[in-house]
Each structure stands twice: as C-alpha cells, then as structure tokens.
Amino acid sequence: MEIPVINKSTNELPTYAHVGDSGVDLKAHLQTIDDKFLFNSEKIYNQEGNIDSIIIKPGGRALIPTELYTAIPKGYEVQIRPRSGLALKSGITVCNTPGTIDADYRNGWGVILINHGTKPFIINQGDRIAQAVLVKVEQIEWEEVETLDSTDRGLGGFGSTGS
C-alpha cells in the first residue's frame, strides 16, 4: 500500500530489512528534539553546535523525532513498536507501546522511548529506535443491550485461571 510521506529528516525513508518483515525501522532525527519532552535525559552537542546524541538515563524517557509526516488512509493506523534487540540488550522500549499514528494525524512522527535498563543509553543521529507497522482498524459501533451471552469463563477476571 502506498502511503504519502514527507521526509524532513536527513535519514532515508524506512525500509523493510527482510522479505516478510511486518515492520520498518524508524530512525532518530535529533536536530528537532524539544527540551520539554526530555525527562531524566540530556542532549550532547558536537563542535558545530548541533545535537550529536541524546542520553536517556535509567528511568528516563524522551520523545525522539523522526521528521516523517504522512497521510495514512482511513481505516488504517501505524503502530509504533519497540525493537526487540534494544529491549533485550539495553532495556529500551516504547513507553506507550504500541504507539498509534492515526489516519488523520499530519504532524511529524515521534517515538517515546523509556530506559528500563540499569545504564544510561545513548541515541545517535540516524539510530534505529523503533518499528512501524501498518494495521487495518475497525471502528466500534456500540449496541446497547440488557444482558450478554454466557461463556465458560463468565465473570472470571485477572488470575481466574490459577496463575
């Protein structure tokens, strides 16, 4: 499916790494990061005064821009998901996983990363920070009723299966 995109970053457009992949890797574009979206995190500048990297300290989080702007077709969303290697090796994950980019959203995509690890984590310009997956969605049409059909589980809640 073709998705209209404006790429204001210095990165190439996201691509699938392998045939059959469901997600494309999103890359950080640090030059437009906003201080108000850094929590227990800091910017590191290079000699030219540009942002070279972001350090997310343990327990910290940051909204990392991608500078991708899209027009997703109605009936679809893009889900922003963690990269498994970052989660396993460093404790870095998407804070609101999965993040949602709605069909009518036109602002730049951002990824909210959180450091659940024990060491500060450095993100450099162009680093792969998350995955984006296009997903078909349905809208709910509520049907108000007086009773629901019965099931074997019934009203059993969390932990009702024993563990």
Image: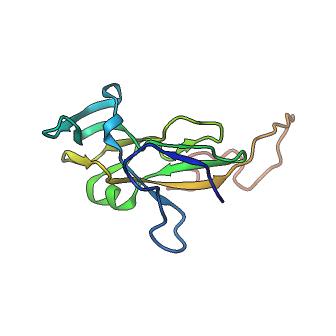
Horizontal and vertical percent for residue 30? Answer: 31, 41
Q: In the displayed structure, does residue 128 sit left or right of residue 56?
A: right
Residue 20 sits in quarter: bottom right
| For residue 19, above or below residue 31 | below
Horizontal and vertical percent for residue 15? Answer: 48, 62
Horizontal and vertical percent for residue 74? Answer: 72, 45
Residue found at the far top of this picture: 36
Q: In the displayed structure, does residue 120 sit left or right of residue 115?
A: left
Residue found at x 69% / y 44%: 155
| For residue 129, above or below residue 20 | above
Front-most of residues 14 and 145 = 14
Residue found at x 29% / y 30%: 39
Front-most of residues 113 and 53 = 53
Q: How many badges with numbers are in the image?
A: 0
Front-most of residues 131 and 138 = 131
Residue found at x 56% / y 46%: 158
Residue 67 sits in quarter: top left
